[in-house]
Image: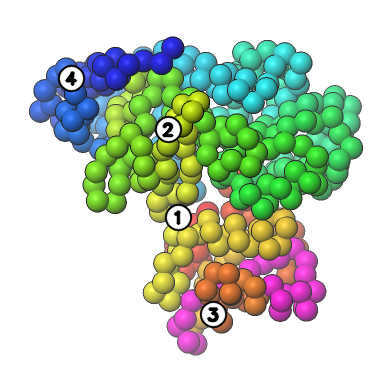
Amino acid sequence: MRKSGKDILLQVSRQIAHFRKADARYRGIRLPLKTWAQLGSVPVSSREDLVRFVQDYPLKDVFNVTATSGTTKDRLLIGHSKESYEVHVRRLVRLYRSVGISRKDLCLNLCSYGLNSGGRLMEVAYKAAGAGVIPLGILDHPGKRAEVVDLVKRLRPTVVNSYTNQLFDLFSAIGRKHSIRCCIVNGEPLSRVFKKRIEGLAGVRIFDHYGAMEVSGFAIAQKPDDDFMKVFDDGLLLEVLTEDGDVACEGRGALLVSDLLNRCMPFIRYKLGDEVELLRRRGGLFVKVFGRLSDTVLLDGEVYSSREVVRTTQDLLGHPQFFFVVEKDLTTYRDVIILNVLSSAPALRSDLRQKLEGALSLERMIDIRTYRGEVPKTSTGKYRQLIDARTKKNNP
C-alpha cells in the first residue's frame, strides 16, 4: 500500500533526527517536517558528503555491505541496515513479478558476485519470487562463455539476468535455439535500435532494469519498447533537481533519492549522479534515464555525451564489440578519437567513418582501427567502451 505524503515526510523527519548528532548539515532543520515546502530546507547531499560521513562517524548496525564502482573514483563501501536490506529484497521481488517472473522460471544470473555488484542480492530476490537460480556470474573469459552455452543447453533456463554486452555474447553463440523467454538487463539501458536487434537475434523479450548500489534496484520497463520504466519506490522518496535549482516530484533533472529506512548511512536527498525524467501516469510513477551527469567527454572544446557516442556506434555496427580511445595528437595538439572494431574491411571502415562523423558531428576526428582480443571491461564485467587516454584516470 502506497504511503501518503504525510507519512513520507514523517519518515524523512525520523531519518534526519537519527543522523542529526553525527551530521552537522541536519542540525538546523526544524522537525518534524509538515509540508513539502519544508522539505526544501533539507540540503542535497552527494558522494563527497557520504565519504566525509563515513570518515567521521563509525557505522553501526550494518547488516549488508556493498560498494560503488571504483572505475571512475575511489570505491565507496555502503552499509545497509537489516530493515533497509529486507525492503530492497521485497522491492526487487515486486519488480521481477511485474514482468512475469514466477515459480515456473529458472534464472541464469550473469551479474557479478563481487562486492561492487548486486548479483547476490538479485539472486536472493529471484529465489524469494519463487524462481530457481543458476549463479554463474560474469562472462569474463572465453571459457566462461563456452560454459554458459553448455548450461543453457543442459539446464534450459527461462530467464537471463545480465549486463547489456553479455546478451550479445550469449545469443551470438546460441542464436534462437534455446529455452530463454526473457532477459532482464542491468546497467546502461539499451537503445531502442539495439534492443530490437538483440530481440530479433535471440527471439526473446528484453526488460531494462534500473537501480544503484547505494539503494539497489527500483525501476523496470514494463514493455520492451517503452523508454520509461515503472518505479517501485517502497522505502524510497524520489525527486528531481532541475538546472535552475528547483526540486520537484516530477520533471527532468538530477535524480535525488532518499532511503527512508537505512539507519547506517544518511541517504537523504542523495544526488545519485544520473539525469532522469520522472513522470506520473496511469499505473504509478515512471522514470526515463538519460545518463550520468558526468557522462561527457571534451573534444577540441566541444562537449559530447559519452553514452550517446557509444549508443550511436552500437546502433550503426549492430554489436557492442568495439571501444573508443581518446588521445592527443602530439604534432597538431588536436584531440583524436580512435574507434577500435573487432573486424572491419577497409571499405566498411571508410563508410562507417563518414556515418559516425555525420551522426556525432565529429569532423575529421575519428580514426578506425581493427583490434584482436577482448573489449576492455570493468571489474563487474561491463564493457569499457570509451577510454580517455589523455588523463591519468581513464573514463569507463
Does 296 sit left or right of 241 as displayed? right
- Which residue is rendered at x = 52% and y = 31% of the image? 230
Residue at image mark 2: 280
The residues colored magenta run: 331-352
Residue at image mark 3: 363
Circle 1 Cα neighbour tier, 10 Å, few/some/many (<14 / 14–19 / ≥20): some
Does 173 sit left or right of 367 as displayed? right
Quadrant assignment, res 268: top left
Give the alpha-carbon distance from disc 1 to disc 2, as whole Å: 26 Å
In the image, residue 323 sits, relative to residue 330, either above or below, namely: above
- Which residue is rendered at x = 70% and y = 43% of the image? 166
Front label number (1 vs 3): 3
Give the alpha-carbon distance from disc 1 to disc 3, as whole Å: 21 Å
Residue type at mark 4 is: Lys
Asked whether the beta carbons under mark 3 and mark 4 sit within 8 Å of each other, the answer is no
Front label number (2 vs 4): 2
Instruction: Please report whichever mark, 1 or 2, sits nearer to the chain's N-terminal start.
Output: 2
Can residue 357 be seen in the rendering of this structure?
yes
Residue type at mark 2 is: Arg
Instruction: Please report whichever mark, 3 or 2, sits nearer to the chain's N-terminal start.
Output: 2
Give the alpha-carbon distance from disc 2 to disc 4, as whole Å: 23 Å
Residue at image mark 4: 34
Instruction: Please report whichever mark, 4 or 1, sits nearer to the chain's N-terminal start.
Output: 4
Q: Secondary structure at mark 2?
A: strand
Instruction: Please report whichever mark, 1 or 3, sits nearer to the chain's N-terminal start.
Output: 1
- Which residue is rendered at x = 85% and y = 24% of the image? 155
